[in-house]
Image (cartoon, rainbow, N blue to C red):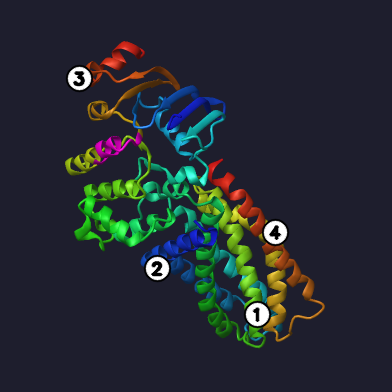
Amino acid sequence: MNAVAVEGVWKFYGDFPALRDIRLAAGQGACLALIGRNGAGKTTLLRTIAGFSRPGRGKILIQGGSPRETETRRRIGFIGHGISVYDELSAMENLTLYARLYHLPDPRARALEWLARTGLERVRDGLVREFSRGMRQRLAVARAFLHEPSVLLLDEPFTALDDRAIAVLQTLLRQALAEGKTIVMSTHQLREALELSSHVALLERGKVVFDGPCTPEMAADPGLVYARYGEA
Amino acid sequence: MGFLRAALVVMAKDLRAELRTKEAVNGALAFAVVILLLFSFAFDPEADTTKALSGGLLWIVFAFAGTLVLNRSFARELPNDCLDALIAAPISGAALFLGKALANYVLVLAVEAISLPVFGIFYNVHWTNQLPELLLVLGLGTWALTIIGTIFSALTVNIRLREIMLPMLTYPILVPALMAAMRLTMDLVAGNAIGPETLPWLKMLIGFDVAYTAVSLFLVETVLVG
């Protein structure tokens, strides 16, 4: 069974098809990089996979279940364009909140563990609005990994990260892959993404125009996929 | 996760965030007091007509001030895309909605609790004459305002003109509940207990609360996810 299966998915905004008959799969332990120009449909696809909106047609399965099922959502970790933490709460309060929403045992201990893993334990009681951009991003990473999801959906995870946050995220993603977790990420940072990826899918105008394994030559020359399979 | 427990976690988060910023409560409270003050200049507090109108006046103030609180409810989730994380969490949309509605209920009641004595002073109304029954009507009327305001706050969260859209959508639907609450409040502040004449209004208010709470809990998942 595939960890993530996208079966003939269409998504419409009014009459405009943002996604057109998308068929993709990622097995357990795979890392699928979704690449494509701005407006190709990467974010729409990831948000639909995450269950933030329903597909117009087709079906999405995460480890065999619909993304809107409560049990399935427990297994998904999502990092989107926003950091999804509250400015008016402290780092500790934010992580404890999400630990409670995910019904984790001992939410405070779990929050402390992830504050330590992301290097934020010294500022745990500081309000997020007082944090630097890099600290906020690390907190966002902690929030997404807190419940130890088995499927990670990451929308341009490396964009606007500082060096330390990139290092933290890459370490966590490598660890996740080593533990057999599945990653689907959209990205413009091809070099960082292709270093981790086992598969690549190129989207153009809402359609998958290439879907295959990530080869060493792709990782060495990130522009290759666009040059070979993309539109001129 | 238990439905009620999830709702309480969301409620606690919203209350904590509001207590830190006091954005909604301060605005709503200032608005309520200013409107009560301005109306007290327009009407003679000693006149019988003013006393007869006072229940209606009070609910108009509560409805307008309440909208300021309700507008912030889902809008609070927009900075940093926090709504995504809540929708992604393994809790039902209904639990998320109920948590937000409960937090709004507490905040609107807090505004009302401060406005009520101000109303008593400015309009020379002995509002404590039928206090337990008045509190019941306030509780039921405020729940009606809260439940409708919260569901439309969810519906309008991504609309650019949501501050305008929320009252435009909320007030027409609230008319039956506001009519009942106004009529009951008028009688209660005049010192009359709820009797056979006003009991149907109370039943209507209870029916409104039950019906719209059920409909909102049923619809909220579609409102949030489509």
Sequence-wise, the earlier of marks 1 and 2 is 2
**Tag 3: Cα neighbours inside 10 Å, few (<14), some, or many (≥20)?**
few
**In the displayed structure, does residue A62 sit left or right of residue A154?**
right
Does any portion of residue A167 appear in the rendered image?
A: yes
Does any portion of residue A89 appear in the rendered image?
A: no
The secondary element bearing badge 3 is classed as helix
Which of discs 2 and 4 lies nearer the camera? The answer is 4
Q: Does the CB distance between marks 4 and 1 fall below 8 Å?
A: no
Amino acid carrying mark 1 in the image: Leu
Q: Is residue A176 magenta?
A: yes
Q: Does the CB distance between marks 3 and 4 fall below 8 Å?
A: no
Numbered mark located on residue B211 in the image: 4
Numbered mark located on residue B134 in the image: 1
Which residue bears the numbered disc 2?
B19
**Which segment is the magenta one?**
A172-182
Q: Nearer the viewer, residue B126 or A91?
A: A91
Which residue bears the numbered disc 3?
A220
**Tag 1: Cα neighbours inside 10 Å, few (<14), some, or many (≥20)?**
many
Q: In the rendered image, which quarter contains the C terminus of chain A?
A: top left
Which of discs 3 and 2 lies nearer the camera? The answer is 3
Amino acid carrying mark 4 in the image: Ala
**Tag 2: Cα neighbours inside 10 Å, few (<14), some, or many (≥20)?**
some
The secondary element bearing badge 4 is classed as helix
Q: Is residue B36 magenta?
A: no
The secondary element bearing badge 2 is classed as helix
Residue B36, position as x, y percentages in the image: 55, 75
Dot 2 and dot 4 within a common chain: yes
Q: Chain of mark 1?
A: B
Q: Is residue B182 above or below residue A28?
A: below
Q: Nearer the viewer, residue B81 or A119?
A: A119
Q: Is residue A161 above or below residue A228?
A: below
